Image (cartoon, rainbow, N blue to C red):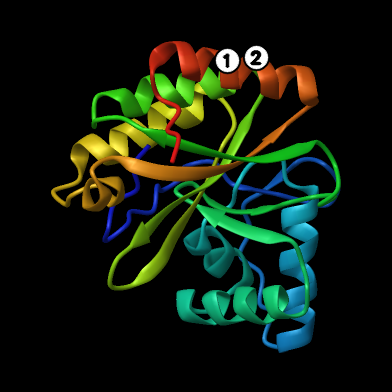
Amino acid sequence: MYASIRGSTMSMTSTLPDPAGGIGSGRMSETNGSGRRARIVELLREGHRPITGSELSGSLGVSRQAIVNDIAILRAAGEPINGGPHGYHWEGDPTSGVFAILTCAHDREGSQKELETLVAHGVTVLDVTIDHPLYGEVRAELTISSHRDVERYMEVLHASDTQPLSSLMDGVHRHRVRAPDDVALASARGDLELLGFLHEG
């Protein structure tokens, strides 16, 4: 599994969800910091897809940097907000599902097969981590849970002119994953083992 060293943010063309369950594209002015952050939480909790920082800044009428700062403040306050290639999303109930760490190793071509195998079992790939000899643990959030997410991630990977993160450690990396239950996790792990992707030691 790979994540670009410089990273890329996928732009989304659809508009933000509104609290009524529809789609709202109007620009709103939110100058009060606490009120704006409350609105960010509301949008992420009620949305059904990741929302990019650019979308949030456009909807709330503030700069992209203001959104980055707001997200950092919300995370520090314990709000379960994650960011990935497709934008920010609400993590939801942190106790739901079955969590595990999978250590894998494969070349660049194995990345798509690994992800497709996991999401086929209903497993969400939350992040990718390597243990760098100089910088220590290096982690990138992913949040890939569908075949469409895999396609988007691979599009970014193929379009990037940077080296993938896992290439720094000969393809060895860890994924934090969330499965719907123990059966799904065991099935996904078994298929990865058959592919020769699971790494021991």
Residue that appears at 54% across and 69% down: 57
Eyeballing the image, is 160 above or below 150? Answer: below
Can you give x and y, in whole percent of width and height, for residue 124 in the image? 62, 34
Please name the residue that numbered disc 2 is placed on.
187
Please name the residue that numbered disc 1 is placed on.
190
Q: In the rendered image, which quarter is residue 44 located in?
A: bottom right
| Quadrant in which the C terminus is drawn | top left
Can you give x and y, in whole percent of width and height, for residue 167 in the image? 22, 46
- State how far apart marks 1 and 2 are (Cα): 5 Å
The residue sitting at the bottom extreme is 32
Eyeballing the image, is 95 above or below 171? Answer: below
Q: In the rendered image, which quarter is residue 177 located in?
A: top right
Residue that appears at 52% across and 42% down: 175
Q: Is 65 on the left or on the right of 32, as rendered?
A: left
**Between 90 and 179, the one nearer to me in the picture:** 179
Dot 1 and dot 2 residues touching (CB under 8 Å):
yes
Which amino acid is tagged 2? Ser
Under circle 1, the secondary element is helix
